[in-house]
Amino acid sequence: MKTRPSISKAELAEKFRSFIDPDFVITDNETMKPYECDGMSMYCEMPMLVVLPETASQVQQVMRLCNEYRVPVVARGAGTGLSAGAMPHKEGVVLSLAKFNRILEVDPLARTARLQPGVRNLAISEEVAQHGLYYGPDPSSQIACTIGGNVAENSGGVHCLKYGLTVHNILSVEMITAEGDRVVVGNDALDGCGMDLLAVMTGSEGLLGIVTEVKVKLLPKPEVARVVMAGFDSVQKAGDAVGGIISAGIIPGGLEMMDGYAIVAADDFAQAGYPRDAKALLLCEVDGTVEEVQEHIEQAENLFRELGATSVKTSQSEEERALLWKGRKSAFPAVGRISPDYYCMDGTIPRRQLAHVLLEMEKMSEKFGLRVANVFHAGDGNLHPLILFDANVPGEFERTEAFGGSILNLCVEVGGCITGEHGVGVEKIRQMAVQFNDEELQQFHDLKVAFDPRGILNPGKGVPALKFCQEYRSLEYKQHDHDTVEVAHG
């Protein structure tokens, strides 16, 4: 980053206090401590200061000041991200949008809602339930994560196979540019003229602008929804069953998979009635009309049995269905009951490669000497391996990072990509040089410069500096079937 005009922390804070409530311009280390990381708590940095504006005009003023003095700005929502995308810059400002938490408008006829970015994902569905509507994307952290963060990471959830990711469920966003201008991208129409800047903003990880308002699509609640739970004695059989369901022409509302470690941990926590002796578990939800659901449920039950399921059970009530999903959505925190720490990865692969990749991860687990619990969106191939480790053991986190990097390299090798919904942030920035060549990375940089000429928005995240890419690619690997034992820290 270019040398910026000189301004001290105290001077900048005083300027912010002229238009933001002084109680919400935070400069002391003790109060700033909760902002040092997001959900990826292994990567931490203290910011220079934190501000919590409450109007879009205040955000504009923050950005104009920071752009003038070339001060880095990291936007933050609920801090539930899992790639260190909201980790502060030590010489920068954390711009928290926690006070932007109002649902501004609900239009039940148009099936839309206009929201501030700090509105929790689950709160949207709770608010519109009275109209027989809900918001489709449902990340496991939906009780806490915010719609602004969902836009930043293009979040999905257990129902993304049928109903899409965030990018498929929003109509427009209001954003503040790096220079402090307020613009709206997207519109209410089914299509619009010009380039699709809304898709560019969705998943941009705070690199291109600060979202201050979001307009989302709402869906009518299905007439009925039921879940088929199938246990298998191997992850390969369960992986093959995922392809079998899709090949049969059934598009489930959700199709999730857990392996043995995750099954036991989630069942201990939620008492969901999972088959605890199974090596793998599929949860297949079918929704729609009563007749449609009954037909597809019978097909799914028969197909799972034909493909080697050792147990098949179907929810008989809404309460039973909710309990089965409670176990799945509790799986991440539940795994914390069986390990001091865990490292949640995120990669996406073609469905046909599920069985192969899961078996390869079993081999990696043995070679790295680390357990791995798998909980993921099987229907769209979005993996979430949880590598279990103990941060108090010297060198174990570094070994865990290397294991995670090997999983991501494998995802790329089989035709997938290094993230599905968690973003790149800091965590996966090394693997960007595996996924993309220098010319492709240059295109990302050119796009970044078009939106943020001075590079103040979330610097050091998402896209590696080109001068480091050759370093990433020239690492000396002692590799045996993806067993990477040396890692770089760019």
Image: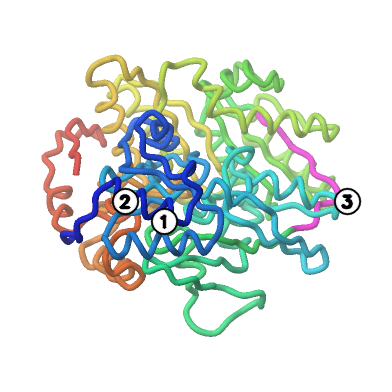
Residue 33 lies, with reference to residue 150, above or below; the image says above
For marks 3 and 2, give the one nearer the viewer: 2
Q: As shown in the figure, which amino acid type bears the numbered disc 3?
A: Glu
* Amino acid at the residue labelled 2: Lys
Question: Would residue 66 be counted in the magenta stretch?
Answer: no
* Residue 226, x across and y down, in percent: 79, 40
Residue at x 61%, y 52% (from the top left corner): 161
Between discs 2 and 1, the one toward the N terminus: 1
Secondary element at tag 3: helix
**Element type where label 1 sits in the image:** loop
Q: Quadrant of the C terminus?
A: top left
Say which quarter of the image contains residue 163.
Answer: bottom right
Q: Residue at x 78, y 69 (%)?
A: 110
Other-residue count near label 2 (Cα within 10 Å), few / some / many at <14 / 14–19 / ≥20 = many
Asked whether disc 2 touches disc 1, contact meaning CB atoms under 8 Å apart, the reply is yes
Question: Which residue is most to the right?
Answer: 290
Q: Name the residue carrying label 3.
A: 291
Residue drawn at point x = 37 percent, y = 41 percent = 84
- Front of the two marks 3 and 1: 1
Segment colored magenta: 219-230
- Residue that badge 2 annotates: 461
